[in-house]
Image (cartoon, rainbow, N blue to C red):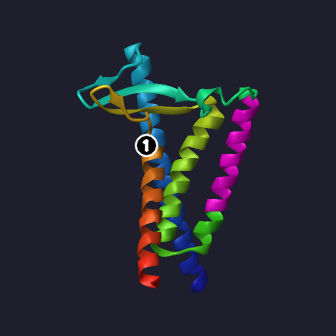
Amino acid sequence: MKFIQNNKKFYLNLSIVFFVYIIDRITKIYILHLTQNNFGSEIFSSKYLNIFPIWNKGISFGLLSFDKMNLYHFLSFFISVIILILMIMAIKNQGLKRLFLLIIIGGALGNLYDRIRYNGVLDFIDFHVGNFHWFIFNVSDIFITMGVIGMILLELTTIKKRT
């Protein structure tokens, strides 16, 4: 009986990660499709939101004088290790903490897929107010951020309960 319960939990956990990953993949494929059909980079523009694809190589400001491809591959490997650590943490935790970790893992896998497949992460959501533009991001980034904020709030409420 315990094996069946563990099996159900495993598939539930896997489906959460898979859901986040698939939503990210669908949005990125759709944006790439729109970009190819429009023959331009801007897909949507409004007063506060622009949708246009950019490829984020993940190396801001050239990072001094390092060889960019070697650093890029190192960062991709480092991200893979972090995802494995998050998976171990998710296995060892339960409840909301596990849920938030699974959401982060799903988002991280979506971006890691892009890094491996395209040598860059496809970002396309640009929020702005006037000339102030937030960082351009994607659906994986939204899920990662939600998971991190959830983890922070969970830790803050846990600290209050302990004191």
Residue 80 placed where, x, y %? 68, 49
**Does any portion of residue 15 appear in the rendered image?**
no
Task: Report which quarter residue 66 is drawn in.
Answer: top right
Looking at the picture, tell me which residue is in the foreground, 53 or 3: 53
Q: Is residue 53 visible?
A: yes
What main secondary structure does the magenta stretch of the protein show? helix
Q: Is residue 21 above or below residue 159?
A: above
Highlighted magenta segment, given as a residue range: 69-86
In percent of the image, x 46 and y 64: which residue is there? Answer: 152
Q: Residue at x 51, y 68 (%)?
A: 98
Residue at the far bottom in the pictured view: 1
- Please tell me which residue lies in front, 126 or 53: 126
Quadrant (top left, top right, bottom left, bottom right) of the C terminus: bottom left
Identify the amino acid type marked 1. Val
Q: Residue at x 66, y 60 (%)?
A: 85
Image coordinates of residue 158 in percent, x first then y, are: 45, 77
Which residue is depicted at the point 46% across and 53% down? 19
Q: Quadrant of residue 112?
A: top right
115 shown above or below 79: above
Query: In which quadrant will I find the N terminus?
Result: bottom right
Furthest toward the left, the residue is 47
Q: Residues within 10 Å of mark 1 (few under 14, many from 20)?
A: many
71 or 93: which is nearer to us?
Answer: 71
Dividing the picture into quadrants, the one containing residue 58 is top right
Q: Which residue is mark 1?
A: 139
Return the x and y of residue 75 as percentages of the image width and height.
69, 41
Give x and y (percent) for residue 42: 37, 20
In the displayed structure, 141 sits above or below 135; it is below
Q: Is residue 73 magenta?
A: yes
Magenta span includes 121: no
Look at the numbered disc 1 and give the secondary structure of its residue: helix
